[in-house]
Amino acid sequence: MRRPIALLLPIAGALLALAGCGGTPDALITEPQPGLLAARPVATIVRPSASPAVELRVVLRAGSAYDPQGKEGLAWLLGHASAEGGTEVLSYPELQALLHPWAAQIAVQVDREQLTFIGRCHRDHAARFVPVFLDVILKPRLAEEDFQRLHKQALAQRVEARTANDEELVKEVLQAVLFQGHPLAHPPLGTEAGLKAVTLADVKAHRAALWTRDRITVGLAGAVDEALADRVAGAFAALPEAGERPIDLPSPPADARRLIIVDQPQGPATAIAFGQHLPVRRGHADFPALSLVASYFGEHRQFHGELFQRVREARGMNYGDYAYAEAFIQEGWGRLPVPNIARSHQHFSVWIRPVPNADKHFATRLALWLTDGLLKDGLTADQVKATAKFLDGYLALKRQTDLRRLGFAIDDAFYGLQTPSAEWLRAGWAALDAAKVNAALRAHLHPERFTVVVVTPDAQAFKQAVLAEAASPKTYASPKPEAIVQEDAVIATWPLGFTAEQITILPAAEAFAQ
């Protein structure tokens, strides 16, 4: 599982002094207000609280979707070279040497559209920490030796990602195929060829082109006030107002029914994922309904999901089975999503965590059969009510810290929400009934257009079995209830319906090579 925040760097000392870190009542200020335009040349969100910590997020529309063709991975290298390469006056070892005294943190997170710098310190150290944090963004060292170190690291991670982490590989291949030919197709880490083509000069030129005020949102939370917000946002005043590269991304390609078999020789288990584009994102009237459907069907790392209950609990086939109504990256090793992975174009997906290789055909059938049943049967009134109640409480866990709430507030601005998303979602869920949920479900999800990705060994044999619609009976080490036995008999011969033209075999060694 990916750890999306790549660097936690305690920092001490600084070259300048900034004041103004007192606490005030909770407030949400979005966009520069008329009297603050000179002080806040970039979009600014301020969320003061009684916390003693100062929380900072600087989010740029400069993620991997803006990598030039042939330089896939440039955004990743730019973000990490900034956060892990020192500043104009501090080398990276010198920056690291400032760890202990302030116990502050600097992190970078590179996603497809958003590149996020995250800073955190105690309010007593903010005056000296904040200028260093800003220097990481505005005055990075970008030295050749640091670039070479990070360049080698990125290439090593790119190779490891396709050889040692099938769980991530299956999801990344699904997104790459869904968005084939689109800026959102390649993962933030880029491709092997793209990374090899990137030079330090490319990093500097990319930074100059994308570090513009129209792409930046500054967020502050915790022990902050408007004076500090003015100073932090004002630090970006010297950047160009806008650049030549467009921010808006084109529409994605049309969905198509297909099966991509990633041939992973000697793979110990089989990973499965499938999905489609979703013309619905936060702010769309149907998003509350579809997020409820995804939670009912398979909330990430929760036990109540239909997929989890039918695949893991009833059959003991794997560790977990989940569904998503939007892009999802988990925070660290936990179950909660990281903020600031907002996307202009979303997709619905199902993730079946690895199953034994012998069960690949049955597991693929089972997951798609359950999805087909979801569309046919829909949700009952009781299921809608129970899921809405769960989500209402679970939403508070997703927003349990100042830093997380700040991140989601920035995402609200990305999606153009006039009401904070927590309030908007709760109101949306409360207004749902079974008829509304099922109407949204059937209007937007189309299994006949799903892209299915299976990472497994013996790809050719699996292809032939799928084309032949060969039976795939499931066996167990201990007896199962008669209802499961009868259900399995139906699933074992349930037609997947792929033609030879719809099936592609991709050697794992070639995944994200070009």
Image (cartoon, rainbow, N blue to C red):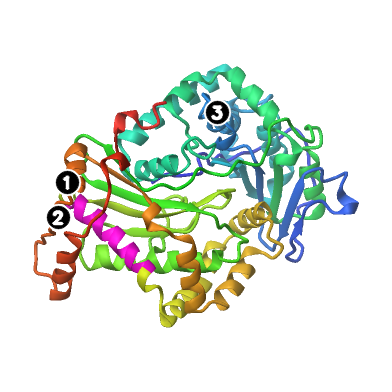
Crowding near the residue tagged with mark 1, few <14, some 14–19, many ≥20 C-alpha atoms within 10 Å: some
Please name the residue shown 26% across and 41% down the image.
500
Between disc 2 and disc 3, the foreground one is 2
Crowding near the residue tagged with mark 3, few <14, some 14–19, many ≥20 C-alpha atoms within 10 Å: many
Q: Can residue 304 be seen from the camera position used here?
A: no
Query: Which residue does the numbered mark 2 point to in the structure image?
Result: 472
In this rendering, the answer to whether 155 lies above or below 430 is above
Residue type at mark 2? Ser
Residue type at mark 3? Leu
> Of callouts 2 and 1, which one flags the residue occurring earlier in the amino acid sequence?
1
Instruction: Give the quarter of the image for residue 134.
Output: top right
Please name the residue shown 66% across and 53% down the image.
410
Mark 2 and mark 3: span between their CA atoms?
A: 44 Å
| Residue 366 forms part of the magenta stretch | yes
Residue type at mark 1? Ala
Query: Which residue does the numbered mark 3 point to in the structure image?
Result: 74
The quadrant in which the C terminus is found is top left
From the viewer's perspective, tell me whether residue 112 is left or right of residue 332.
Answer: right
Question: Which one is nearer the viewer's eye here, 354 or 47?
Answer: 354
> Of callouts 2 and 3, which one flags the residue occurring earlier in the amino acid sequence?
3
Q: Are marks 2 and 1 in contact (CB under 8 Å)?
A: yes
**Residue stretch in magenta:** 359-375
| Residue 50 forms part of the magenta stretch | no
> Element at badge 1?
helix
Between disc 3 and disc 1, the foreground one is 1
Percent x, y for residue 262? Answer: 29, 38
> Element at badge 2?
loop
From the viewer's perspective, tell me whether residue 443 is left or right of residue 358.
Answer: right
Query: Which residue does the numbered mark 1 point to in the structure image?
Result: 465
For this orientation, the residue located farthest to the bottom is: 382
Please name the residue shown 58% across and 56% down the image.
404
> Element at badge 3?
helix
